[in-house]
Image (cartoon, helix red, strand yellow):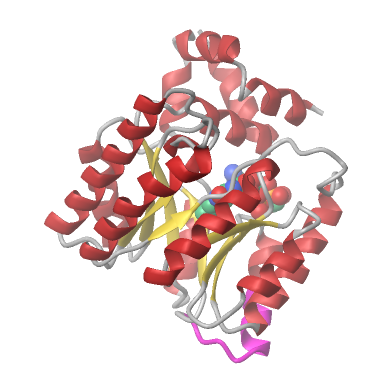
Amino acid sequence: MLAPVLLAASRSARMRKIVAAAPVTRPVVDRFVAGERLDDAIDVVRELDARGLTVTLDHLGEDVTDPSEALRARDAYLRLAEALHGESLGARAEMSVKLSAFGQALAGGHDIALAHITPVVEAAAEANTTVTLDMEDHTTVDSTLAILDVLRDRFPQTGAVVQSYLFRTEEDCRALATAGSRVRLVKGAYKEPATVAFQDKRDVDRAYVRCLKILMAGGGYPMVGSHDPRMIAIAQDLARRFGRKAGEYEFQMLYGIREAEQERLVAAGQRVRVYVPYGTDWYGYFMRRLAERPANLAFFVRSLAGR
Ligand code: FDA
């Protein structure tokens, strides 16, 4: 019941101010965010690497409304790519980008986002790593997939994300499940209308399994983005059924969530990648995590009450 309210709040400037000003917010945010600085993120990459985990780094930011913010987002990713290069971490850590942080919603935003993401993808390739384009609300999907298409001409390893809650996604999976294509499948984290997305969790889960089947059967590299034990077990069954060995697909989970499960999978020989957000603009990301899971919200409320 609360999830739609929290997801609406995740895009409210007024709520952003209230939540950010609450003194207890920070410790709760720290559960999900690696830190504010690039150095914090690199430290976390090293820690996770020591535990056998790979990483995708997200410089927090989204929904920019000013062209100068889009440039700042691009520059933050260029610095990240440079750091990964300098520290020779490209084989262990890739980058996840939200195109709305690169100006996708501005007037002429499609071209602006493409112009800003291109040097980042080039810098990633120089650093021996790659970029995955996060997927945002349904109004952005066509633009994001079109930008992906252009980037893949020169950088076929650029990753896509698809969301099983959208009706269109099975079709998108079929189109994307081709040789060399890296595709992260998630359930979807935005508030979407019934005209475009399943509203019942069970339907979202069923669609997730159908999409997994398409990706595992196809020629690409499936990236199973979920904390759900059922989806993880089904992914392993499907991988076996379609003759994929560990390393011919991977599991992905968010920083701070189900760490014991991440380690269990690594110990079982699976490849696991942790999505590590860092930076100061944590509000939207944080609110989506609260919306996803009542226990996260309860932790936040208990912190408030404990003061
Ligand atoms: P879901 O929330 O449906 O929970 C199912 C079950 O999983 C729970 O009942 C519980 O057993 C277990 N579980 C879930 N969370 C847990 C926790 N905190 N602790 C213990 N158990 C837990 N979304 C999007 O729209 N665009 C994107 O680009 C991305 N990118 C992305 C990257 C990665 C690596 C991940 C893991 C996720 C995303 N997402 C995303 C978010 C995604 O869409 C989704 O909102 C969350 O992953 C939550 O869905 P789950 O599949 O994890 O399970």
Residue 306 drawn at (x, y percent):
54, 12
Quadrant assignment, res 51: bottom left
Residue at the limit of the structure toward the left, as seen here: 86
Which is more toward the observer, 135 or 259? 135
Q: What stretch is highlighted in magenta?
A: 234-246
Horizontal arrangement in the rendering, residue 6 relative to residue 79 (left or right): right
The residue shown at (21%, 64%) is 126
Residue 258 drawn at (x, y percent):
53, 51
Horizontal arrangement in the rendering, residue 141 relative to residue 5 (left or right): left
Picture mark count: 0
The residue shown at (61%, 34%) is 288
Residue 98 visible in image: no
Which is more toward the observer, 287 or 114? 114
Which is more toward the observer, 241 or 7? 7
The quadrant in which the N terminus is found is top right
Which is more toward the observer, 248 or 49? 248
> 259 above or below 299?
below
Residue at the limit of the structure toward the bottom, as seen here: 243
The residue shown at (49%, 68%) is 265
